[in-house]
Image (cartoon, rainbow, N blue to C red):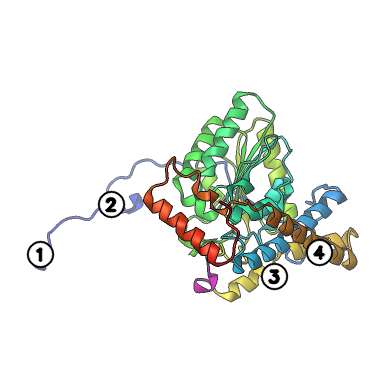
Amino acid sequence: MEEGRSERTVPSRRWSDRKEKQMPRSEVDWPNEVTYLQILDADGKVDEDLEPDLPKETLIKLYKTMVLVREFDAARLRLQRQGEIGTFAPSTGQEAAQLGSICALKDSDWFVPSFRETAAQVWRGAKLENDLLYVAGFEEGMALPEDTRDLPISIPVGSQVPHAVGIAWASKMRDEDTVTMCYFGDGATSEGDFHEGLTFAGVFEVPVVFLNQNNHWAISVPRERQTASKTLAQKALAYGIPGVQVDGNDVLAVYAATKEAVDRARDGDGPTMIEALTYRMGIHTTADDPTKYREESEVEKWRERDPIDRMRVYLMDKGHMDEDDDEAWREEAKKEIKAAIERYRDNVPDDLGSMFEHTVAERDPYLERQRKELMDYWERAGVEVGH
């Protein structure tokens, strides 16, 4: 025996490796499974047997909103690089996952976003100029009308999950005909809030739909470093909740899966978790450089599955649009964005130093020094800063 080593028996890690008599075994009854749904293939061709019955007007609205939000991302990025607004999280590549799901809700249902749901927010009536105001640093931009059932965006990852579950539980206790939909990314499934929320939702069978946008990257952490699970949808099964996986770049598949989940919740059959397989085609936020941690070849592979391109082919095949329509709608989107930018500029608060007014009752010397430095900087830059 080598010096310094002790004689001890290392127990086997597996029961099946044990030499002694084993305990009786039996299969656990496990009826659950994860199914995968795709209706539009990568080329935009539809499986007519699975095609949902959506009116032409709704299909066109979905496409036009996808185009609008994609153009808005590009416009916001230009404004941010020019220093006119601050950091934001683009939704480019994830438009189908957001719009296919949000359009399954009624106006009376609750919408609980994270920080990347621009497309879903626009569908629910959010104004583009308010988004610009918010990302420019003014909380006024996130003020929501009292008659809406939309929550403001949630920056801390996963923290909105318990909020959504609480809202759904209140709806159930009040016997209201409402469903709550909660959005989060793959990174959120590693947070305790996610597991606590699903535990509660499963036990109390609350009317909530968990919409997981698995875009394969939690900032620079790839999906395979988030969990060893084969899917994220299967995590729901551990909490007694059905888990479904869909092609998140297929707006029809996302709608069909979400509509079924919303109907289940509304009928009192409890929550569902949907894993929408999509891809963040751009930056995590404007403070990010994805070239530092992922290969361009991966991005190119997902560009071939672009949700807008697939929807365009589908609508053209159905005769709902042609090339002239597409060009006109894109120009219409650009004009709408340009007008929103002008409204945003007109609505920037006169007192740009107001951000310091609502932090503490009395500003301490450190905060006062920060305020003075900012005021001096803006004055040197020729910016009107108010009083």
Note whether residue 379 is visible: yes
Looking at this view, name the residue that lies furthest to the top. Answer: 174
Label number found at residue 64:
none
Depicted 81 relative to depicted 214: above or below: below
Nearest to the eye among marks 3 and 2: give it. Answer: 3
* Disc 1 element: loop
Residue at which label 1 appears: 4
Disc 1 to disc 3, C-alpha distance = 60 Å
Q: Disc 1 vs disc 4: Cβ atoms closer than 8 Å?
A: no
Secondary structure under badge 3?
A: loop
| Secondary structure category for the residue under label 2 | loop
In the image, residue 130 above or below residue 317: above
Q: Depth check: 252 or 118 in front?
A: 118
Decide whether residue 292 is among the magenta residues. yes
Checking the image for residue 304, the label placed there is: 3
Bounds of the magenta span? Answer: 288-294
Gap in angstroms between the C-alphas marked 3 and 4: 20 Å
Kindly identify the amino acid type of the residue bearing the numbered disc 4.
Arg
Report if the CB atoms under discs 3 and 2 are less than 8 Å apart: no
Location of mark 4 (residue): 330
The three-letter code of the residue at mark 2 reads Lys
> Residue 146's spot in the image, x, y percent?
67, 35
